[in-house]
Image: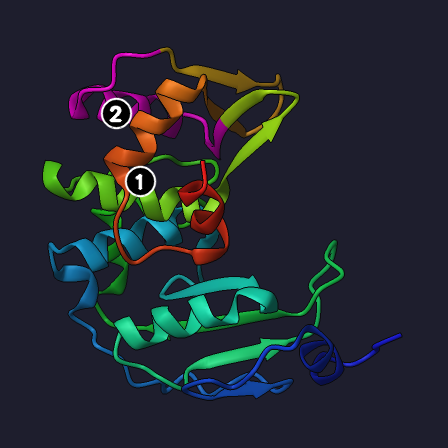
Amino acid sequence: RIHTVSGFIKEQGVARKRGSWSVGKRPSSAIHWDKDFFKRNCPVTAYWAGFIFADGCIVDGSSKILTLSVTDIEHMHDFAEAIGSVGAVHIQGPSEGSKFPCARVRVSGMHLIEDLRRWGIVPAKTYNFVAPEIPDELVPHYIRGWFDGDGYFRERHNKEAFRITTCIGAEEWCAEQLRILGYTGHIGFERKDGQAWSKIVISGRKNIAWVFNAIAGYPRLERKWSKIDAF
C-alpha cells in the first residue's frame, strides 16, 4: 500500500513532463503570474474561468485556489502555463473526505476579486450565485470549462446523460445560455430540498451531441473529452 504523496504519484505513473511542482510544504504566496489574465475576453480565459467557477474557490478574501486530483496534474500544468506561472503547481496529501492527493495552484492579486466577479466567481459562490457577464461568443468556452470542472457524461443501459453540478441559480443561467446558442431540446434540473446545489441534466443522444458540438474546443480536459470524442 502506498502511504505517501510521492509514492502515490509514482504508483499512478504521473511523470514530470513539463514544469515542476512542490510536494508537502505550502508554496510561497509570492507566485509570479499574469495578473491581467482574467481581464481578457478570449477563449482561453473564458475556459479557465468556467473551470474555476466549477472547481475553484476564493480564500482569505483575496486569493484564488484551484484544486484537482493529482491524476489530472497535466491539466493543472496547462492552467499554470496559461496564466504565465509554470512551476506553480503544488501537491499535497488528501483533504478531508478524499483518499487521493491533490494538485493546487494558488495566486493572488490586488484586483483579482473584481476581475473574477464578472466571470461569476465570488467568495462562497456555492451559496451566492452571481451571473457571469461575458460576451456571447465566449459562452461555449466558459461552459466547456464548467463541464470539465464539475460535469460528466455517462452511458448506461443504452441511455446517455450529460450532467453538470452547480449552485442554485446557476443551472437556470446555463440553460438560458444554451437556448441563446440555439439549443431547442429538453433541459432538466435535479434538486433536493435543503441542498445548496442542483444538476443540469440533458439526455438523448441527439440532444447531447448538439451540446457537445456547441461547446467543443480547446483547452479541454482530455480525460473527459476522449470519451466524448468516441460518442
Relative horizontal placement of residue 54, taking residue 196 as reference (left or right): left
List the single residue furthest toward the front: 230
What residue is drawn where x is 39% and y is 61%?
A: 61
Q: Amino acid at mark 2?
A: Leu
Q: Marks 2 and 1: in contact by CB < 8 Å? A: yes
Point out residue 129 in the picture as x, y percentages from the top left corner.
36, 34
Q: CA distance from mark 1 to mark 2?
A: 9 Å
Relative horizontal placement of residue 121, taking residue 13 as reference (left or right): left
Residue labelled with disc 2: 178
Relative horizontal placement of residue 210, taking residue 72 as reference (left or right): left
State the residue in front, 31 or 12: 12
Where residue 206 sits, quadrant-wise, is top left
Q: Quadrant of the N terminus?
A: bottom right
Please tell me whether mark 1 sits on a helix, a strand or a loop.
Answer: helix
Mark 1 or 2, nearer chain start: 1
What residue is drawn where x is 33% and y is 35%?
A: 212
Where residue 158 sits, quadrant-wise, is top right
Where residue 29 sits, quadrant-wise, is bottom left
State the residue in front, 23 or 63: 23
